[in-house]
Structure formats: structure tokens, C-alpha cells
Image (cartoon, rainbow, N blue to C red):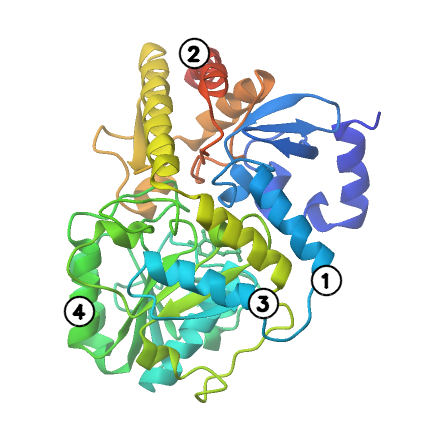
Amino acid sequence: MTNNQQLFDSARRLMPGGVNSPVRAFGSVGGTPVSMVSGEGPYLTDAEGKQYVDLVGSWGPALLGHSHPTVIEAVHRAVDAGLGFGTSHPSETQLAELVRERVPGAQMIRMVSTGTEATMTAVRLARGATGKNIVVKFAGCYHGHSDGLLAAAGSGVATLGLPGSAGVTDAQASETVVIEYNDRAALEAVFAEHGASIAAVITEATPANMGVVPPDPGFNAFIRELTQRHGALMIFDEVMTGFRITEAGYWGASGREEGWTPDLFTFGKVIGGGLPTAAVAGREEVMAHLSPTGPVYHAGTLSGNPVAMAAGVATLQNASADVYAHIDKTAQVVANALTAALTDAGVDHSIQKVGSLFSVAFGTSAEGVANYSQAQAQQSFRYGPFFHAMLEAGVYLPPSVFEAWFLSAAHDDAAVEQIIAALPAAAKAAAE
Ligand code: PLP
């Protein structure tokens, strides 16, 4: 049997860092990445035959657990009918209907293939619809890897952004303003300085890419109010939260907000049921600016691919209120056990949690982390030993302290017990 080390050595000879997406390389936790060969329910099995309880869930899509029989069957049926036609077909409308039923603000929908493409398209659409150029984003919010969204904060509150990656030009970054999350004064200052030129504010509905950071009460509504006042659009990035966090009746983080709706949403992960699908959605009048009805160009060879649509439709059809109740309850049980184990081991920490999405931050005050500066200031060195102790005990956590833990409908008592049993030793490892 080829082991994980041999597989990673081969991968490193062929792919930069041995991976196709950087966090998978275990850079921040050390050690050899585990090569997974199959997934079923709450479990993954690696190339050496070891089984893990999975808390990554394919980074979010696996809401129902791995290889859910109904989803697999729907995909098989779609495959048997053909892998793709490059034409209109019924299941893309079916998935769009399911999205609109659950997110009333999503009046029209355009399917794309990745979350990156969704946010990139939403930004272009916002610029095309408003005729303005500047996009405001929050430090620590991740919206995929399109050039303009890989901007880093400039030196002052209302200054234009700097490139956040090699290869992003000053010109691209300079049309993005980056400010601290949950900072109303900074947002007001940006609008005071650049109001007439701001096309959109883009925000994760609940940030979960600097660890989970709950929006202060009313912060999203405040973004809505300022954007509306200045004729800018609000883009609610629900690639992570959409159809995962559910409260107040509908099925993204926006369900938590009352009395308003963003202009545009982006979805991904869960709506593709594990296959490459994402979407831009929003107000009909704004969405009508997209080609072919409007002048903002967007296209995609694989957009609305029927096999991916089948996975998405089967996933959303099975994402019942019971599924969400189970995930919310299970997340609370695991979060409680996590905080108890860390407290027993004397490790200062905060559990960062919104609905079923949560993460842990080390060495923080009891109030927890409210923005990216605080997230970066935590004792992230404690996560590597914690992660490896869990891995040893057969629990696969995200290989970075800045990522959320994902539960699924398939995490049953046996899986949860295995997680809880592993926590005390991992907490001790984090304490050293
Ligand atoms: N937006 C958010 C909030 C995300 O969490 C991610 C990915 O994790 C993206 C956008 C980009 O999605 P993708 O990785 O499918 O390009």
C-alpha cells in the first residue's frame, strides 16, 4: 500500500507544494498531509486505510455527510444522461427555484462554477450596474482569489488597498478599500471620503475565514443602510454560510437579519452538493445587467453543468429543517466539549460560533475575536499540536486555526463521541 508520505512526495514533484489549494499542504500545522481515498457519512478514509471523523466536510459542501445515497443516486442518473450539453436544461432551473424559495432576495440567479467566480462576477456586476469603481471589503474576509479581492489594507482607514498577493497589480488593488471588520467608524470614514465612487461593499454574511467572527448586532444592517444611502450595492457573500447557517426561516446567514435584504448574494459549497457549482443571485433589476440581457459580461462552459446541478438539487431537497436542527445541536455539543477540555487544561481560548459554524481561537480574552487584527494576534502556535493530537485519535480537523469546523447531518452519536473522547489529550497538547 502506498502511504501518505509517498503520495505527498510524488505530489510535490508534480504540483506546487504538492497540492491544488494551499491550506491542504499542512503549512501552518506541520507534518505530512493525509491523502484521503473515500468518504462515507461523517468519515473519511486515508490511503493507509485509517478512518477519521471528518470536521472539514470538503470545506463546507458536505452538509448531508459524504456519499449521501440520494445525492449519489441523483448524480449517477445525471451521468447516465450525459456529462453536459452546453445548452439549457431542466435541472438548472430546478436548482435556481430551490435557491429562490429559500432566499426571497435571490430573485434571479446565475450559476457559475466556483465561489471565486461568483464573487468576481458579483463585483463586475456591481460596477457595471452602478457605473462606479471602488469596492469596499473587510480585512480577514475571504471572497476567493480574483485579483481585486486579493487586496490588503492600506495604511490609513480610508486609503485604497495594496496588492495582497504577488501578481496583483497596484492598479487592481487600488480600487479595493480594505477596512477592519465590525468597525462602523471606519466604514463611515470610507463613505465620507469615497462615497460617490463606491460601487459595492462586499462582506461575508458571517465571516468564517479568519476563524468564525460574529458580526456585532446590527453590523450587517448598518452596511445595508450606508450602501443604500450612497447608491452603492451590498454584496452578501454566502458561499460559506448559504444553506448551512439557518435561523429565522430561511437558509443562509441572511435569514438571521430582519427587515432588509442585500442587493446581491453569492452562494457556493452546499448548493453544489460537493460538485463545482456556485451562484450569483439578487435583485432582478441588478441581475438584468448580466449578459445577455445587459452589458456586464459573464459566461461559462461548465456553468449550470447538469451533473453538478443534480448534486445541488438532491442536496437542497434533502436539507430539511431536521437536518439543520441536528447540525446546530451537534455543533453546540462539540463546542461545549471543546471549551470544557481546554478549560480543564488551563488553555485560554474563545469559541467563535454562529449557528453551526464555529472555530477556536487561542490565548484570547473571554469576549473573543471581533476582527482580523485580533484573530492574527492569537496564540496560533497552539493549534498545530492540538490538530495533530486530534489527527492521531482519528479526527480530521481543518489544518489551520483560521478555518471553521464543519459538521453534517451524518455526524451521529458514535462520531461525536469519538470527537469528544479525543479532546482532553489534544487540549493538553495545546497547553504545552
Ligand atoms: N467566499 C467565501 C466566503 C469563501 O469561504 C470561499 C471559499 O472558501 C470563496 C468565496 C471562494 O470559493 P471557491 O473556493 O469555491 O472559489
Q: What's under tag 4, amino acid-wise? A: Leu
Q: Name the N-terminal-most of marks 3 and 4.
A: 3
59 relative to 311, above or below? above
Q: Is mark 3 on a helix, strand or loop?
A: loop
Q: Residue visible at 56% across and 30% down?
A: 41
Check disc 1: other Cα within 10 Å, few if <14, some if 14-19, many if 20+: few
- Structural crowding at the residue carrying mark 4, measured as other residues with C-alpha within 10 Å and reported as few (<14), some (14–19) or many (≥20): some
Mark 3 C-beta closer than 8 Å to ligand 1: no
- Marks 4 and 2, how far apart at CA: 46 Å
Q: Is residue 312 visible?
A: yes
Question: What's the amino acid at mark 2?
Answer: Pro
Nearest the camera: 279 or 196? 279
Q: What residue type is labelled 1?
A: Gly
Q: Is mark 2 on a helix, strand or loop?
A: helix
Mark 2 and mark 1 lie on one chain; the one further toward the N terminus is 1
Specify the label residue 226 is tagged with. 4
Q: Which residue was labeled with disc 2? A: 424
Disc 3: which residue: 167
Measure how far apart labels 3 and 2 are at the Cα level.
Answer: 44 Å
Q: Do the residues labelled 2 and 1 touch (CB within 8 Å)?
A: no
Estimate the x, y position of residue 257 in percent, counting from the top left: 20, 53
Spatial CA distance of label 4 from label 1 is 47 Å
Residue wearing tag 1: 82
Q: Which of marks 3 and 2 is in front?
A: 2
Above or below: residue 239 compared with residue 382: below
Left or right: residue 190 compared with residue 117: left
The structure residue drawn at horizontal position 50% and vertical position 20%, both measured from the top left corner, is 415
Q: Give the mark, 3 or 2, whose residue is nearer the N terminus.
A: 3
Q: Which of marks 3 and 4 is in front?
A: 4
Q: Can you say which quadrant of the picture contains the C terminus?
A: top left
